[in-house]
């Protein structure tokens, strides 16, 4: 594959004479690449050129979204390096009025130097609302720089240090151009944030008033970070709406980390989507605590992801309590737990009493024919009450032999809902062979899973 520099278009290409935000960004970016002796990122230069050509006929065609994800075919063998990311950050900082709102640098090789430069840029460029750094090599140092900007504690004298540590020289003119960041979405999942970085972000959440979405999935968080983040959201933050703390590297055998999460759900009035999969939570005391002290007092959470925990059949009663008492829950993911028939039956009994639930994922829970039949009955109760599920996933459980009660019950329940005009999607479909109902797998359109599509 050719290097990015050889793929870049000729710089002598003719463009509209009027200077635009995109043309200034292009010039600044190429100048920074030259000064840092790093090759420009070819797909970025091509995107800039394409928007400049479009501006000849449409004055609104400014570049607003930079997508440089390293898992894309063009960048897979030439992923964005620290130097290239710093050059882009400097250009975005110098052209601080450019139209770029979304910046995707996921799955590259970025470390703390790039994160520090981007942190300084966020103070200068108030238009950037979304920053995706998923799947890089950013550690607690880079995370701390981003947190200081979000917290608003990166003072005038602090920013030149942040920038100089990235080797940028961005400190010039910071005192007169410093602005509070407007960042709304930050994705640091699959980085090496660790407990130190998590605590820094928790401190930032106590004062930040712009961030609405934070993803820290598989970010090396420990118990201290989980507690600090949940505490900050429950006590001080009033703007965050989407939070993922999935797959920490450390959790308590006694489920002590369930308490700060429960307090957060019970006290916070803005977080509508919470992801705590792979927390090692057991039915008791983990899930019981989360439900009794969190969900039963919460009236805003819409999505709760509890996949890949250790919730067994006794946890079904706690899930049922949440379904009966919570008035906002729309999406519940319990994939890859151990509910079994008894847990499924408890959930099935409560389905008809839920007025809000729209999506339920019970894949791979060790549920056999008896439990699946009960779930089909619960699904029919929801349909008859006029509030059916829109999406249900039950594949990966044991439907029994062809023609089993579970297979027939689910076929009839889904058919009845659709006959009544409800748009219900399921990850199972049915084929009748020799008079026996067989269950087959369906997969959602747009996923990488193999199978029939719905």
Image (tube, rainbow, N blue to C red):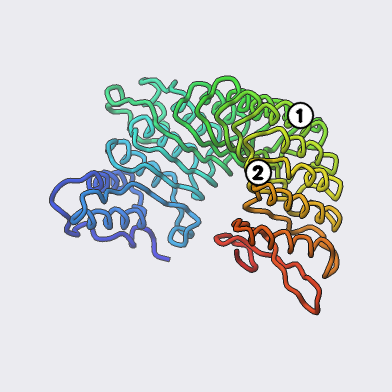
Label 1: few (<14), some or many (≥20) within 10 Å?
many
Label 2: few (<14), some or many (≥20) within 10 Å?
many
Up/down of 439 relative to 275, above or below: below
Q: Could you tell whether 358 is left or right of 316 in the image?
A: left
Pick the quarter of the image with the N terminus: bottom left
Pick the quarter of the image with the C terminus: bottom right
The location of residue 412, given as percent across then percent down, is: 74, 62
Helix, strand or loop at mark 2: loop
Q: Which residue is mark 2?
A: 357
Residue 204 visible in this rendered orientation of the protein: yes
Q: Nearer the viewer, residue 356 or 155?
A: 356
Which residue lies at the image location 65% right of the left edge and 30% below the top edge? 226
Ranked by sequence position, the earlier of labels 2 and 1 is: 1
- Place residue 270 in its image quadrant: top right
Residue 245 visible in this rendered orientation of the protein: no
Instruction: Tell which residue pokes out farthest to the bottom in this image.
Output: 434
Up/down of 67 relative to 283, above or below: below
The location of residue 359, given as percent across then percent down, is: 64, 48
The location of residue 388, given as percent across then percent down, is: 66, 50
Q: Nearer the viewer, residue 421 or 335?
A: 421
Up/down of 22 relative to 199, above or below: below
Up/down of 52 relative to 218, above or below: below
Q: Could you tell whether 442 is left or right of 103 in the image?
A: right
Marker disc for residue 289:
1
Helix, strand or loop at mark 1: helix
Q: CA distance from mark 2 to mark 1?
A: 21 Å
Which residue lies at the image location 78% right of the left edge and 53% below the top edge? 377
Question: Contact, CB < 8 Å: mark 2 with mark 1?
Answer: no
Which residue lies at the image location 65% right of the left edge and 68% below the top edge? 451
Query: Mark 2 against mark 1, which lies toward the viewer?
Result: 2
Which residue lies at the image location 38% right of the left edge and 35% below the top edge? 167
């Amino acid at each position: 594959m050719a290097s990015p520099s050889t793929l870049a278009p000729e710089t002598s290409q003719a463009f509209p004479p009027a200077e635009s935000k995109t043309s200034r960004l292009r010039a600044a970016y190429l100048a920074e690449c030259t000064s840092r002796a790093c090759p420009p990122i070819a797909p970025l230069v091509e995107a800039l050129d394409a928007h400049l050509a479009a501006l000849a006929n449409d004055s609104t065609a400014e570049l607003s979204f930079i997508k440089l994800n390293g898992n894309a075919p063009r960048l897979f063998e030439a992923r964005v390096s620290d130097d290239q990311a710093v050059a882009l950050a400097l250009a975005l900082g110098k052209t601080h009025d450019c139209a770029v709102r979304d910046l995707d640098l996921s799955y590259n090789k970025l470390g703390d130097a790039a994160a520090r430069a981007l942190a300084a840029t966020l103070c200068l460029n108030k238009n950037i609302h979304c920053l995706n750094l998923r799947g890089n090599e950013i550690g607690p140092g880079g995370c701390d720089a981003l947190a200081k900007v979000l917290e608003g504690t990166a003072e005038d004298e602090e920013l030149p240090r942040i920038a100089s540590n990235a080797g940028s020289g961005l400190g010039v003119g910071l005192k007169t151009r410093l602005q509070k960041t407007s960042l709304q979405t930050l994705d640091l999942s699959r980085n090496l944030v660790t407990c130190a970085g998590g605590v820094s972000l928790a401190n930032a959440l106590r004062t930040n008033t712009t961030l609405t979405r934070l993803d820290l999935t598989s970010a090396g968080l420990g118990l201290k970070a989980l507690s600090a983040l949940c505490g900050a959201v429950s006590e001080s933050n009033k703007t965050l709406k989407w939070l993922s703390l999935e797959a920490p590297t450390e959790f308590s055998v006694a489920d002590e980390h369930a308490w700060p999460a429960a307090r957060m759900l019970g006290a916070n009035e803005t977080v509508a989507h919470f992801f705590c999969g792979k927390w090692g939570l057991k039915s008791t005391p983990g899930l019981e605590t989360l439900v009794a002290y969190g969900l039963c007092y919460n009236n805003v959470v819409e999505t709760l992801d509890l996949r890949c925990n250790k919730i067994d059949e006794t946890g079904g009663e706690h899930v049922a309590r949440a379904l009966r008492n919570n008035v906002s829950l729309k999406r519940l993911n319990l994939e890859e737990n151990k509910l079994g028939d008894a847990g499924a039956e408890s959930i099935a009994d409560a389905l008809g009493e839920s007025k809000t639930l729209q999506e339920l994922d019970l894949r791979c829970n060790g549920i056999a024919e008896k439990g699946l039949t009960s779930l089909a009955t619960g699904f029919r109760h929801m349909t008859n009450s006029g509030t059916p599920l829109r999406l249900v996933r039950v594949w990966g459980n044991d439907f029994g032999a062809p023609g089993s009660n579970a297979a027939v019950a689910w076929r009839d329940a889904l058919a009845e809902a659709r006959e009544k005009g409800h748009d219900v999607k399921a990850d199972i479909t049915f084929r009748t062979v020799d008079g026996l109902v067989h269950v087959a797998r369906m997969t959602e359109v747009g996923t990488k899973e193999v199978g029939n599509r719905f």
